[in-house]
Amino acid sequence: MARVVLFALVLAQTVFALTCSKRATAFFDPTANGGSLLDDAGDGLGEPLNVIVSGLSSPDVLTDDGIVNFARAIGFSEECLDIHLGAPQSANLGDGNGPVNQTIELRQDFDDPVIGTCLESLIGGNHFRVYRQNGSLADSGALFLAVSQEENVTTGHTISPDGYDVGRDALVSAAIGSTNFGGVSYSTTAENITGLIAAGSTGVNHGIAQDGIVTLLTVTIV
């Protein structure tokens, strides 16, 4: 009986270790397994996945509630009155799940997490879509963000000129260092990565060129 219990304990520890090791990486390159660093915005075009929240971040950050709380700490909230206009976009992160719709879309809240995103819907601002890499082929747990600065409602919320790079840089600037929201404090570091997506406008929604830089954020709850 004692041997059976010991075997069960060893097996459980082994499974736990294997599970942890699968996520002991910042992210997997989606293109290695047929994915892309462009999401699918329709008509064969896509928006750059230009920020990655590392799978090495604190686990609570990588949950649905966790990314929303972190977003609020850096000036974003859920959509105005929880109303989303337009179809969701999808992304293939090369993790074996194929194209998957965005988990959530978050908008700049102008320091008012209750109604600030309603203002963003009117005058424009920064926003991002979230996709999670968690399939059996590449289970990093990382969150891939499609970040962009958009114009006001009279333009149909089209992306601003240079809006992909501008949006990414603004989000990263707000995130790095120390932030907090809802009693949770974060320390965030950033690393720019090249080679994941080609610079230029080929395949990019609205034909807006981007510089080919993807910023990796590692977010630690402190």
Image: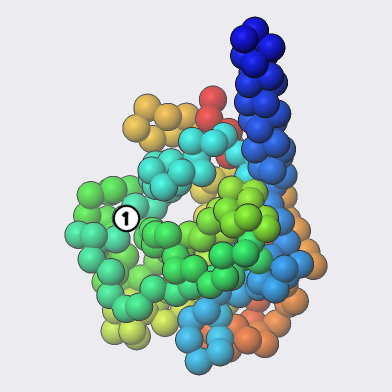
Nearer the observer, 30 or 84: 30
Residue 9 sits in quarter: top right
Q: Secondary structure at mark 1?
A: strand
Location of the C terminus (image quadrant): top right
Residue 48 sits in quarter: bottom right
Location of the N terminus (image quadrant): top right
Q: Residue at x 52, y 79 (%)?
A: 40
Nearer the observer, 23 or 123: 23
Which x, y percent locates residue 64?
41, 47
Q: Horizontally, is 182 left or right of 81 in the view?
A: right
Nearer the observer, 32 or 195: 32
Which x, y percent locates residue 154?
29, 84
Looking at the rendered structure, the kind of residue marked 1 is: Glu
Asked if one can make out residue 48 in the rendered structure from this viewpoint, the answer is no
Which x, y percent locates residue 59?
54, 36
Asked if one can make out residue 96 in the rendered structure from this viewpoint, the answer is yes
Q: Residues within 10 Å of mark 1 (few under 14, many from 20)?
A: many
Which x, y percent locates residue 113?
28, 48
Residue 215 vertical position relative to residue 33 in the rendered view, above or below: above
Residue at the extreme front: 1
Q: Residue at x 44, y 65 (%)?
A: 102
Residue at the extreme top: 2
Q: Mark 1 = which residue?
A: 78
